[in-house]
Image (cartoon, grey):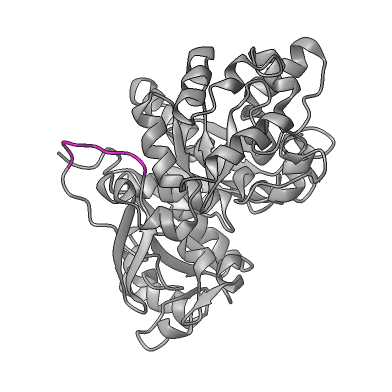
């Protein structure tokens, strides 16, 4: 059985993280992704560190399973080429500032007149309407703007960003969902549509119960650090060799935790006898539990607690997580053959299609790696392609040039 999206042709005009992450998802699912990069230097993230062999790890993290073409967006002939490619594609994905595609002559209203079943998908920072629509859409700025940062951290630390660019990544996932919905609808209607999301929308959608609590009760939730805001004890605690998470979510689990830890007297202590009391006295409770937990390691406690029916697990470093047997058995890492780096390990698509053929994952393309081949597939003759390359409207990397990009 072939990959789910095999046969769909996607013109990828995105850069940085949110858009490339979205199109990488589609590529992992089998779509043909044509990544278009501007001359002279290509996608902006190629210049962002850290680097390995002069290759940006930032770029490598979000651009596998794509073919690369380089075009000069600033030239009318280059824009005409982009329009020709867009009309011949199933899906066009972009994350420019609102209004940029229209200014380039590539807006959905224009393209859909010539290709009614075209799907266009857009990500912006703050959305395409409203007073902030033209603000630069940087992840941390929008983590703060959305209220997301106000829920993260502790009262002492103040608002704290998450350790990954969750605004970019969530917007990319939401856009992929929107694109797939449009593809399904097009199958029955024969008509495409314009799908849009933003970093702001993506983060607002993830506010969860904290957002609902505020909307219903009008009480802003305080940041609770690594502790559950309404259940105790539920959070991170120090064992003899580092931190672990423990999540006894019920009264019965709390009593069982005390039994396993040989601190049954805490279950009858008035300060800890009910969940409400434990939340009120969570600092004292944490101190009492950690006296007990310091007697064993994270993994020793994890084994004992899980055996007793209490959810628990170590707080791993990335080195520990990537070396973990469960991660390995679930196929959460992929090893790709990269022409510069040799074996390139990456975090895999977190979906299994058990009856699908074994997929071959391709490494992120070098700048201008597939220009000639792609233009040929879009119907340009060898003479036309030679002319575009000669006039520097497009660029085809030579084998010797790829190491420079």
Along the horizontal axis of the image, is 262 left or right of 351?
right
The residue shown at (39%, 73%) is 369
Q: Position of residue 48 (x, y in %)?
A: 61, 70
Along the horizontal axis of the image, is 144 left or right of 63?
right
Q: Position of residue 143 (x, y in %)?
A: 72, 42
Along the horizontal axis of the image, is 231 left or right of 310?
right
Query: In the rendered image of this protein, does residue 208 appear above or below residue 65?
Result: above
Count of marks placed on residues: 0
Res. 181 image quadrant: top left
Q: How would you classify the magenta stretch by its main secondary structure? A: loop
Residue 115 visible in rendering: no
Return the residue nearer the eye: 287 or 31.
287
Quadrant, the N terminus = top left
Residue lying at the far right in this picture: please name it: 131
The residue shown at (71%, 18%) is 271
The residue shown at (63%, 43%) is 167
Query: In the rendered image of this protein, does residue 354 appear above or below residue 343?
Result: above
Query: In the rendered image of this protein, does residue 84 appear above or below residue 108?
Result: below
Q: Position of residue 16 (x, y in %)?
A: 59, 58
The residue shown at (77%, 25%) is 221
Residue 339 visible in rendering: yes
Return the residue nearer the eye: 393 or 92.
92
Q: Position of residue 337 (x, y in %)?
A: 28, 69
**Is 384 a magenta residue?**
no
What segment is highlighted magenta in the picture?
A: 350-356
């Amino acid at each position: 059985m072939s990959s789910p999206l095999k046969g769909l042709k996607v013109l990828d005009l995105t850069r940085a993280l949110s858009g490339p992450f979205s199109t990488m998802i589609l590529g992992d699912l089998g779509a043909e992704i044509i990544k278009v990069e501007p001359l002279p230097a290509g996608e902006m993230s190629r210049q962002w560190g850290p680097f390995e062999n002069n290759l940006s790890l930032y770029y490598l993290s979000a651009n596998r399973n794509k073919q690369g073409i380089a075009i000069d967006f600033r030239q009318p002939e280059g824009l005409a080429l982009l329009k020709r490619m867009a009309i011949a594609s199933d899906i066009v994905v972009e994350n420019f500032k609102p209004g940029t595609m229209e200014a380039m002559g590539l807006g959905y209203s224009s393209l859909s007149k010539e290709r009614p079943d075209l799907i266009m998908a857009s990500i912006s920072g703050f959305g395409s309407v409203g007073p902030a629509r033209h603000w630069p859409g940087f992840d941390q700025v929008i983590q703060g703007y959305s209220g997301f940062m106000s829920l993260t951290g502790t009262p002492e630390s103040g608002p704290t960003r998450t350790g990954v660019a969750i605004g970019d990544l969530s917007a990319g996932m939401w856009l992929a969902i929107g694109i797939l919905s449009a593809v399904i609808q097009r199958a029955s209607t024969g008509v495409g549509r314009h799908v849009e999301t933003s970093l702001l929308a993506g983060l607002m959608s993830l506010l969860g119960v904290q957002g609902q609590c505020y909307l219903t009760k009008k009480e802003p939730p305080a940041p609770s650090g690594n502790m559950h805001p309404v259940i105790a004890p539920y959070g991170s605690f120090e064992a003899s060799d580092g931190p672990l998470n423990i999540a006894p979510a019920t009264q019965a689990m709390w009593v069982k935790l005390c039994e396993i830890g040989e601190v049954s007297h805490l279950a009858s202590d008035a300060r800890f006898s009910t969940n409400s009391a434990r939340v009120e006295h969570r600092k004292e409770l944490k101190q009492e539990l950690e006296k007990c937990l310091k007697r064993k390691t994270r993994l020793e406690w994890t084994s004992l607690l899980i055996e007793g029916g209490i959810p628990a697990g170590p707080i791993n470093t990335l080195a520990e997580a990537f070396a973990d047997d469960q991660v390995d058995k679930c196929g959460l890492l992929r090893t790709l053959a990269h022409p510069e780096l040799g074996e390139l390990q990456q975090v895999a698509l977190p979906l299994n299609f058990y009856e699908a053929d074994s997929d071959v994952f391709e490494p992120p393309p070098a700048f201008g790696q597939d220009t000639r081949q792609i233009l040929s597939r879009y119907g340009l003759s060898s003479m036309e392609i030679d002319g575009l390359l000669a006039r520097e409207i497009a660029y085809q990397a030579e084998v010797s040039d790829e190491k420079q990009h």
